[in-house]
Image (tube, helix red, strand yellow):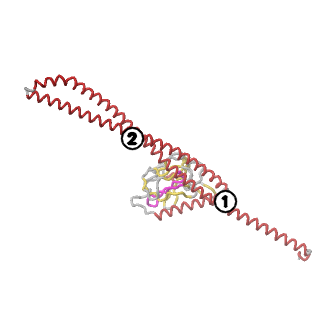
Amino acid sequence: MLYGLLPAGLVFAQSDDAEQELAELQQELKARQQALQGSKADAQELQSVLEQSEKDIGAVARRLNNTKTALAENRDQQESLKSRRDELEQAIAQQQELLGGQLRTAFISGNYDYAKMVFYQEDAARFERVLTYYRYLNEARQKEITQFKVSVTELEQVNAELQAKAQELTALLSDQERQQNELVARQQDRQQTLVKLRSKIASEESRIAQLRETEQALVEAIERAQRASQVPQELTGLSGEKGKLLKPASGTLRRLFGKRRQGQVQWKGIMIDGREGSAVKAIAHGRVIYSDWLRGFGLVTIIEHGDGYMSVYGHNQALLRSAGDAVAKGETVALLGQSGGQSSPNLYFEIRHKGKALNPLQWLDI
């Protein structure tokens, strides 16, 4: 009815305007969808860059840790060699003094005894005693001379070893400085990647989605590791260890378990804020079933304890044990860090039983 009251030109004009507006809206929607897809692709690419960066940091930190261990061993060896050198120098001085005294005694008494030996020839028994005395004296002197030579030779060897250890120490210190500089550079690269990545996932919706993906990735990693592993019979689980398990790292505890993380997502574990590069230890004996980078958790170690129990250690700087390795209670399995996009060094820790997250605070001796 309305169209019948309007001029035909006006109706066509309004129709054209609506179609034009619809086309513009569709074009804008398409552009936004493309931009969203582009942002997701960029975020995914940055995740890959972050993964590689944190793996590189882990490798450098592991080499640096080995170098520090070698430095400590080198210094201990040098101290031991220096102590042996001091002992040898003291022994040589005493041997020199003893030999000098023997030579002086032999020289002083030699002329007198030799002259008397001419007269002792008619007294066979007395002559034999004098000869025996000289033989014992010479043997004792020869023994001291031999020991003196042995001490001098060993001293030369010790001094040579000390020189070699000093050169080795210089090389190790150079390696340490180079590795430390490389670690700093890698950490700076990681920080730049992290800033870019956070700008891509700033919205609440995308953050919640990422947290859900992160949680699901951990569950899937655990399931894959469980399927791939065969638990040794001696691993009997943690059922009798409630409240007795070792705290996995030194530092300030954040009691996060069960608290709201974001949206409807809740914390499944706790965090321990600590010093970067400090030891992360196994809470009980078991076997490593996962040791790799995992989105949202960074460098992760998962230990199977038997009967469906396992412990999870995330945000590490470096992983020191590989999948399949048996570990003892208190053994260092990783170095504490801030991988997985953390802004400060901490350990993320979980205990699970048959896939269900347990409250670590009820299990650790803290």
Q: Which residue appears at 18% of the width and 23% of the height?
A: 111
Residue with the mark numbered 1:
205
Specify the quadrant of the image occupied by residue 78: top left
| Residues packed near mark 1 inside 10 Å, few (<14), some (14 to 19) or many (20 plus) | few
Q: Magenta segment: does it hold 315?
A: yes
Q: Count every numbered label the image shows and give the total.
A: 2
What amino acid type is highlighted by mark number 1?
Answer: Glu
- Residue 19 lies, with reference to residue 323, above or below; the image says below
Residue with the mark numbered 2:
161
Q: Measured from the top left, where is residue 173 in percent x and y? A: 49, 42
> In the rendered view of the protein, which quadrant contains the N terminus?
bottom right
**304 with respect to 181 (left or right):** left
| Residues packed near mark 2 inside 10 Å, few (<14), some (14 to 19) or many (20 plus) | some
Which residue is nearer to you in this view: 110 or 286? 110
Q: Please give the range of residues in magenta.
A: 299-317
Q: Which residue appears at 43% of the width and 54% of the height?
A: 327
Q: Measured from the top left, where is residue 53 in percent x and y? A: 57, 54
**12 with respect to 174 (left or right):** right
